[in-house]
Amino acid sequence: MIRLLLADDQALVRGALAALLDLETDLEVVAQVGRGDEVVAAARDSGAQVCLLDIEMPGLNGIDAAAAVRRELPGVRSLVVTTFGRPGYVRRAIEAGASGFVVKDTPARQLADAVRRVHAGLRAIDPDLAAASLVDGPSPLTARERELLVHALDGSPVAAIAARVHLSEGTVRNHLSAAIGKTGATTRSEAARIAQDRGWL
Amino acid sequence: MIRLLLADDQALVRGALAALLDLETDLEVVAQVGRGDEVVAAARDSGAQVCLLDIEMPGLNGIDAAAAVRRELPGVRSLVVTTFGRPGYVRRAIEAGASGFVVKDTPARQLADAVRRVHAGLRAIDPDLAAASLVDGPSPLTARERELLVHALDGSPVAAIAARVHLSEGTVRNHLSAAIGKTGATTRSEAARIAQDRGWL
DNA sequence: GGCCCCGGATGACAGGTGTCACGGGCAGGT
DNA sequence: ACCTGCCCGTGACACCTGTCATCCGGGGCC
């Protein structure tokens, strides 16, 4: 019997996944949480062997949660399940110590198999995404550029971004100009969108 | 036995919801589709009585799909299930003829009850969202403003938007300026974000 | 030490953006 | 016939934005 922890911020999806996985005779959902920062404690208390982690979660995202599980509970394996198949996400998830990466539009029957593979010490990574993350290469962005792009995601004016990060307006424009160049964009909004699509943020 | 159709573009979520609802002894999932434009045909072929429709779907969104079901299959009721609890979505879903509106972070056990209520001819609408959609009021945007905001969502320059919709650059700026005023924003990006949050797009 | 990259900042310039005033045209009401 | 609202367009103006050159300081690294 494989003991599972589910982490997803949408209660309906979490409950539905639990129902789906409990149908398998060799799987058992022993814990459910809706926040990333509750994963480690719940996994320890429930004695979970595999954690299914959504990326988009309040408190702590799924990738950082996988890293925390790796650090705090070395015997427990993580399987990241996410809506967005962004190449950079795969890279970061694997670097964080996750054993698997599955997008939410894979067929439902394959999820249980992915769980079994991860529990057996194998990897379960979407092959298309693995390939895409290789051709893209790692993020070329510096820490500052990354930070400023996050703030530029919603289309804020440069002045607002500068105020939020306590930087000169000109400095913000310089960093964003660099990011625009590296992403091949022509606007900071476009650069932010591209970086987000690749999982660089 | 209530016959259900599930429409959600994420196969994993779709399959998981099917597993969840099939656990109920009085419910039966008789059809699953991943696109909005397949809903009517699948509902007709399967003899579904209630359709669970996600809003974000390729082909046709869940609200328009509800309208199509209303028009083509008057006896079939629709229940809109979505990730984003945007007030305008509720209004539009009800106007499109949906009988219910549920967000994806409601507890899993309440979903089956919502389905039963809808099947019985009652409404199942998230009370908080219903209240929010009343205080917000209907969208003040004209059709053009709405269209241009959609194109402004990704932060495209005015020139690109103008080219896409075959309008003068000045006209686009005028319409967007009006939209900025109506949303209380200061940038077209911000206006687009606000309008989207309220479900006006 | 010298080199390179990064962070931070300034100044200048071309081009993009938001606002306003104003014009015309077309439908729907009264 | 008149008014109102929406659509489309132009022109002008102040401001914002992206780019470039240039400077300084701090780490790594050979």
Image: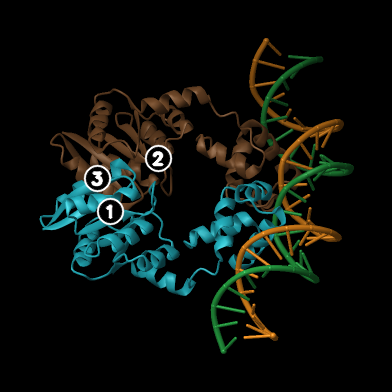
Chain colours: A cyan, B brown, C orange, D green
Q: Is residue B96 above or below residue C29?
A: below
Circle 1/circle 2 CB separation < 8 Å:
no
Q: Which residue is mark 2?
A: B62
**Chain of the residue that carries numbered disc 1 in the rendered image:** A
Looking at the image, is mark 3 or mark 2 nearer the viewer?
3
Circles 3 and 2, Cβ within 8 Å, touching? The answer is: no
In what element is the residue under mark 3? helix
**Is residue A101 positioned above or below B84 on the image?**
below
Relative image position of residue B90 (x, y in whole percent): 43, 30
> Residue A16 got which mark?
3
Q: Residue at 39% across / 32% down in the picture?
A: B71
Foreground of the two, C29 or B128: B128
Which residue is at a point 20% across and 40% down the rendered structure image? B21
Amino acid type, mark 3: Ala
User: Residue A151 or B115: which is nearer the viewer?
Assistant: A151
Q: Residues within 10 Å of mark 3 (few under 14, many from 20)?
A: many
Q: Which residue is mark 1?
A: A40
From the top left corner, tell me how far across and down residue A195 is, in percent: 53, 61
Mark 1 neighbour class, 10 Å CA radius: few under 14, some 14 to 19, many 20 or more: many
Q: Taking A187 as reference, is B43 above or below it?
A: above
Relative placement, left or right, of B154 versus C1 is left
Does any portion of residue B94 appear in the rendered image? yes
Residue type at the position of mark 2: Gly
